[in-house]
Amino acid sequence: MTGTLSGRVATLCDEIVAVVAPEVADQVRHIGVRLHEPLRVAIAGRLKAGKSTLVNALIGRRVAPTAAGECTRVVTRFRYGPADRVDVVSRDGGRSSLPLDDDGMIPQRLGVPAGRVAYVDVMLTSARLRDLTVVDTPGLASADTGVSARAEEAVGTAPFDAGIDAASASEVAAAEAVVYVFTQAVRADDVRALEAFRASSARLASTPINALGVFGKVDTLVGGAADPWPVAEPLAAQQQALLSRCVGEVVPVVGLLAETGEAGRLTAADCAALGRLAQAPDLPLLLASVDLFRTRPAPVDAARRERLLALLDLYGVGFAIAQLTAEPQLGTGELVRRLVAASGFPRLRHTLQETFTWRSDAIKAGWALARLERLAGHTVGRADAEALRDAVERLLRDPAYHRLRLLEVAQRVATGAVPMPQPWEQELIRLATSDDPRWILRLPQAPAGQLAEAAVQAANRWRVYAVAGAGPAQSRVAQVAHRGFHLLAQSLRTGAGR
């Protein structure tokens, strides 16, 4: 699971273990083990924002319950395993195993008092979890101020519900990346909740560089079976502006369609029922509201219509019927593919791959080095602390690890901690988050020689900015960017690539 950067850090951890005290070695060993695990992404958001629905779509199985219950009030980690298994981890470290219920989902009742649960550890045979561990979190910023106050006091920073304890909070904080899920307009307390969540998570995880926003349930923006996308796209852009210091992008999604399609829940019988509904003489009236769809006479019985609403809601039903009206012979598989496309989920999946999976090597390496630095600051033994700091500094002197310094300064700029003119900020973020010199330098058709010259010019611009016109904080950022473009120019000249 380790890449070039994280693999070197894992080797460094092995070397440190041999020279420090046993109690320090145990912590370093834990950091090294994490480097061999898949990238861990936490799904955060308000209660009933659609987090669990999104988790199911990402996993490709409907295993996370979406109705409120014991298991939606605790942290749940989904990871790959050789067999399906649910373990309830208690605060004292004990584990009790549960089978999935008859529907293949986590049982609503965990068999352990909620106050004793640290988190639920779910192992699944889903191939999608080989490269990505998903952490489903309780709701943020409950309207129940008493619950929120107790949770905030328990965690110290992030306002989770259900009195989340330190063990649960640490499970969330261990995530290297974060997806925020919200619906409708962003409110002021949404922003505060997201800022608090960011404060509780890993250093490089929840910044605009390594965090995404998901605008879920966009089908609820309009009435009946009307197309929500003309409303959803501009609203997502507005939300992006409001959350620009929290997330790198806001992606609108119809979560229920994504879950139904990705988890393969729509059957041939469902498709046949949709085809019969397409022949209904009063179809426009049926699709005018959920109540009319349920109660009007129709060529499909009430139970099947209720199932279709549970799978697709009214927008999905209307979309599917429109596809079958245009192509009556459309197969179930193709209809499912079109429903997934209509959900907006493919864009989200692509964005996740570009933003998280592609950068996972650097994200994990940066996370581990940050943990080693923090451990050095809290280590009592002077020799152990010096050994940790020396090892980290030795590694960071390697030019290959300058990428981590770039990510660190880019996230400071992106969050507004270090203000910088927008063109400079954008160029820095491109340099920190991509290995494509044509994209970084905005020269999509340029040959290598022209790219190398452009990289030299960029390095010179940042060097000048560092010594003239920049404050102390901007100057430090500019020096890191200068070296980054200098290294890029060198790699282009030697033909080695970045």
Image: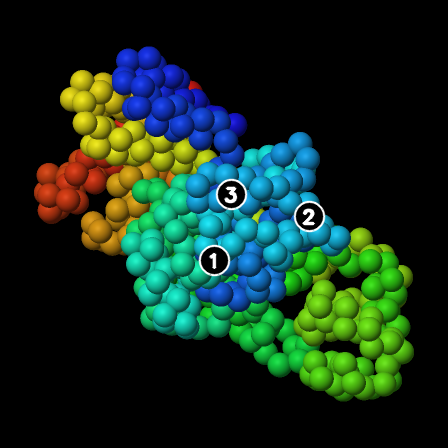
Along the polypeptide, which appears first: circle 2 or circle 1?
2
Q: Is residue 172 found left or right of 263 in the rendered image?
A: left
Q: CA distance from mark 2 to mark 3?
A: 16 Å
Q: What amino acid is found at the position of numbered circle 3 in the picture?
A: Val
Q: Would you say the residues marked 2 and 1 are in contact, meaning their CB atoms lie under 8 Å apart?
A: no
In front of the other: 393 or 409? 393
> Residue 335: image x %, image y %?
78, 59
285 vs 99: above or below: below
Whether residue 312 is visible, yes or no, is yes
Of badges 2 and 1, the one in the foreground is 2
Q: What amino acid is found at the position of numbered circle 2 in the picture?
A: Leu
Q: Would you say the residues marked 2 and 3 are in contact, meaning their CB atoms lie under 8 Å apart?
A: no
Find residue 153 and report its image quarter: bottom left
Q: What amino acid is found at the position of numbered circle 1 in the picture?
A: Pro
Residue that numbered label 1 is attached to: 138
Kindly state the secondary structure of the residue where label 3 is placed: strand
Of badges 2 and 3, the one in the foreground is 3
Q: Is residue 339 found left or right of 137 in the rendered image?
A: right
Q: Which mark is residue 100?
A: 2
Residue that numbered label 3 is attached to: 89
